[in-house]
Image (cartoon, rainbow, N blue to C red):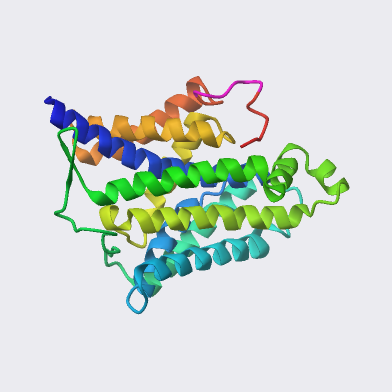
Amino acid sequence: MTSQLFLQYLFAGITYGIIYAIVAIGFNIIYNTTGIINFAQGEFVMLGGMIAISLHAILPLPLAIGLAVISTMLIGALIEILFIRWLRSPSVLRMIIITIGLSILIREAALHIWGENVRSLPYFNGNEISSIQLLGANISPQVLWVIGICSIMVMLLSLFFKFTSLGQEMRACAANRLAATLCGISTKNMVTFSFMLSAGIGALAGCVVSPITYTQYDSGTALAIKGFTVAVLGGLGNSLAAVLAGILLGVIESFSISVVPLAFQDAISIGILLIILFVRPHGLFGSREAAGLKEF
């Protein structure tokens, strides 16, 4: 393998890994606040891309993306209010079934609205044949947009949870919901906001990656699987570790193309997930003691 091809695979792996990490962070935001594994997270990514594509027909691209993110956040809030808020101490199995059902419902609604056609947003600058020479590898400008925007999202989320009162209230709900309630924190509102925040970052990621991965009504399912794999790989609830785990999975998938056919790429993710669940269920970067803690 030449050094140029190596770098090409590496940058591709990092790009997809960061996308997986953003989906995993969406899982972790909701899990940290509620203990719920939201298997509809991939649909938020799909909705962000699809809504932005539709709005871009009549609006400038930045405005279309902004409205798509806001719309998806409102959908996330609506889902929590209608399907989650009224439940009282639901079992893990019940929540899994509900979120899987929501994923199917959103996917079928998207099929009815947008059909089966594959769509995409235009490149933020340049086009599909534009490239930048970086260390001898040809990199699409959109790849740099993906890496840059998703990296900024990760940093801003980390600062939000550490230094803002709202972020600290969400962390308090994660640590002890009863104690947070006694301190005057509205845990119901915190849960709703966690769904909104998770939907918003998923939607923005969906808009940024749409030009290079394209968007279809069922594209969220594969992302949900990859995001859940990364969340487990990094340790559920640990969003910073999810970034490392996402890049690791993305690089493994990218380099696997040189060994196995592209059709087996999803099987690699599932295989890694099963191995982690059997061998180290608390994740590569977690510990048995920390497995029960929920902190960003």
Residue 29, above or below 11 = below
State left or right for residue 40 relative to residue 287. left
Q: Residue furthest bottom?
A: 58
> Eyeballing the image, is 161 above or below 114?
above
In this view, the residue farthest toward the right is: 182
Tell me if 131 is positioned left or right of 20 in this view.
Answer: left
Horizontal and vertical percent position of residue 107: 43, 62
Residue toward you, 96 or 76:
76
In this rendering, position of residue 111 left or right of residue 120:
right
Q: Quadrant of the C terminus?
A: top right
Residue 151's quadrant in the figure? Answer: top left
Q: Residue at x 75, y 48 (%)?
A: 89
Tell me which segment is drawn in magenta: 284-289
Total marks placed:
0
Q: Position of residue 21 (x, y in %)?
A: 44, 40
Please identify the dominant SS of the magenta region. loop
- Whether residue 36 is visible here, answered yes or no, is no
Q: Residue at x 39, y 41 (%)?
A: 18
Q: Is residue 227 visible?
A: yes
From the viewer's side, name the closer residue of 71 and 99. Answer: 71
Check the picture and name the quadrant holding the N terminus: top left
Residue in view at x 40 percent, y 59 percent: 46
Q: Residue at x 83, y 43 (%)?
A: 178
The image quarter containing residue 294 is: top right
As for residue 295 lying within the magenta part, the answer is no
Q: Say which quarter of the image contains residue 81.
A: bottom right
The spot of residue 258 in percent (x, y) is: 17, 30
Q: Position of residue 141 (x, y in %)?
A: 25, 50
